[in-house]
Image: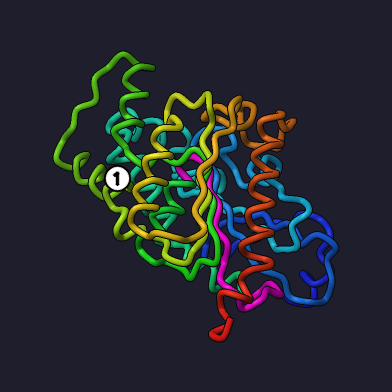
């Protein structure tokens, strides 16, 4: 398998620890190992590993980019298919759908990363993580729970307070959300601003990107996370940026296949590429050198 992926020059699909993925090879692939970046998609477009790879390809990055499928999406749909997933959301969107998917996606990262490292020629530097929407929330949760050693992370339109998500859903449906004890428990676990002390990235560079047109996770929520972490950690690589024309969905419907990248999407992909270039593919050796 390793010999096969060393000559990989095009996207390839596979499965790691039961999780489907699409992998893109490093820019200018060679026999030398390269860093590993793992991406998690959203509930909205891009809502598949292929769509995410097309939306944030980071094509010039000299790293393996592996885009994972979320639980209950794509090949991991339950027996009842989309109708069953929709039913979970109708019963209790936070406690039965959003929360369980995000928590499982974060929990399975460790095993997935270990299997990817056994099959791809990657460096021994810590992994990069990137996520969009629900995938971004899973990335932050994985950081908080130390699921994998992380060299650099980036999140796009993260849901850092589930109350914002449910308020947006109430506006769309016109139906008040019943805050049951189970829902409040999910809110407590996924309120990542409140968990800043656990989330505190320390020496892990973290980029928070918000869309200026995002009505679900508006820029002030990302800024609040940034400011809380900055206050918690002091000096480290932490940045918050707003892409003015970016909405919560960063790709076209139905969001299952790559679509045309918008100008806002181009800016987002460029910011991610520069972030991982600076903090994963270049600076990781400096951070892991005890004398550096």
Place residue 169 in its image quadrant: top left
Seen in the image, is 89 located left or right of residue 129? left
Place residue 13 in its image quadrant: bottom right
Q: Examine the structure image and report whether residue 63 is included in the region drawn in magenta.
A: no
Look at the picture and state if 248 lies above or below 67: above
Residue with the most extreme bottom position = 291
Residue 89, visible in the rendered structure: yes
Percent position (x, y) of residue 277?
A: 69, 59
Q: Nearer the viewer, residue 84 or 251?
A: 251
Percent position (x, y) of residue 281?
A: 68, 66
Image quarter in which the N terminus is found: bottom right
Image quarter in which the C terminus is found: bottom right
Look at the picture and state if 274 lies above or below 211: below
Percent position (x, y) of residue 4?
A: 79, 72
Residue with the most extreme top position = 174
Q: Secondary structure at mark 1?
A: loop
Residue shown at the point (25%, 42%) measured from the top left? 187
Way the structure is coloured: rainbow
Residue shown at the point (61%, 71%) measured from the top left? 284
Residue shown at the point (49%, 38%) measured from the top left? 157
Percent position (x, y) of residue 113?
A: 54, 68
Residue shown at the point (44%, 24%) measured from the top left? 215
Q: Nearer the viewer, residue 21 or 64?
A: 64
Q: Examine the structure image and report whether residue 133 is included in the region drawn in magenta.
A: yes
Seen in the image, is 215 located left or right of residue 178? right
Q: Which residues are magenta?
A: 118-135
Seen in the image, is 79 located left or right of residue 292? left
Q: Residues within 10 Å of mark 1 (few under 14, many from 20)?
A: some
Seen in the image, is 167 located left or right of residue 203? left
Look at the picture and state if 158 lies above or below 65: above
Residue with the most extreme front position = 235
Residue that mark 1 sits on = 191
């Amino acid at each position: 398998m390793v010999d096969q992926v060393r000559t990989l020059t095009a996207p390839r699909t596979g499965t790691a620890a039961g999780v489907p993925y699409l992998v893109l090879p490093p820019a200018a692939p060679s026999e030398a190992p390269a860093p590993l970046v793992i991406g998690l998609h959203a509930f909205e477009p891009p809502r598949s590993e292929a769509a995410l790879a097309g939306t944030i390809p980071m094509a010039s990055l000299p790293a393996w980019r592996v885009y994972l499928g979320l639980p209950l999406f794509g090949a991991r749909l339950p027996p009842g298919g989309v109708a069953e997933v929709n039913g979970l959301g109708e019963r209790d969107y936070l406690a039965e759908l959003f929360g369980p998917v995000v928590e499982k996606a974060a929990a399975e990262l460790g095993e997935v990363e270990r299997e990817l490292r056994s099959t791809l020629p990657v460096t021994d530097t810590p992994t990069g993580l990137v996520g969009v929407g629900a995938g971004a929330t899973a990335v932050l949760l994985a950081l908080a729970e130390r699921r994998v050693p992380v060299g650099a992370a980036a999140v796009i339109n993260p849901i850092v307070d589930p109350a914002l998500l449910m308020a947006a859903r109430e506006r769309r449906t016109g139906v008040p959300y019943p805050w049951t004890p189970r829902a409040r428990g999910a809110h407590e676990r996924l309120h990542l601003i409140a968990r800043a002390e656990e989330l505190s990235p320390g020496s892990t560079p973290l980029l928070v990107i918000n869309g200026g047109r995002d009505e679900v996770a508006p820029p002030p929520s990302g800024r609040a996370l940034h400011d809380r972490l900055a206050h918690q950690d002091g000096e480290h690589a932490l940045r918050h940026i707003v892409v003015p024309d970016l909405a919560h969905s960063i790709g076209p419907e139905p969001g299952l296949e790559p679509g045309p990248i918008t100008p806002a999407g181009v800016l987002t992909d460029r910011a991610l590429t520069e972030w991982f270039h600076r903090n994963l593919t270049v600076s990781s050796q400096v951070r892991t050198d005890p004398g550096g």
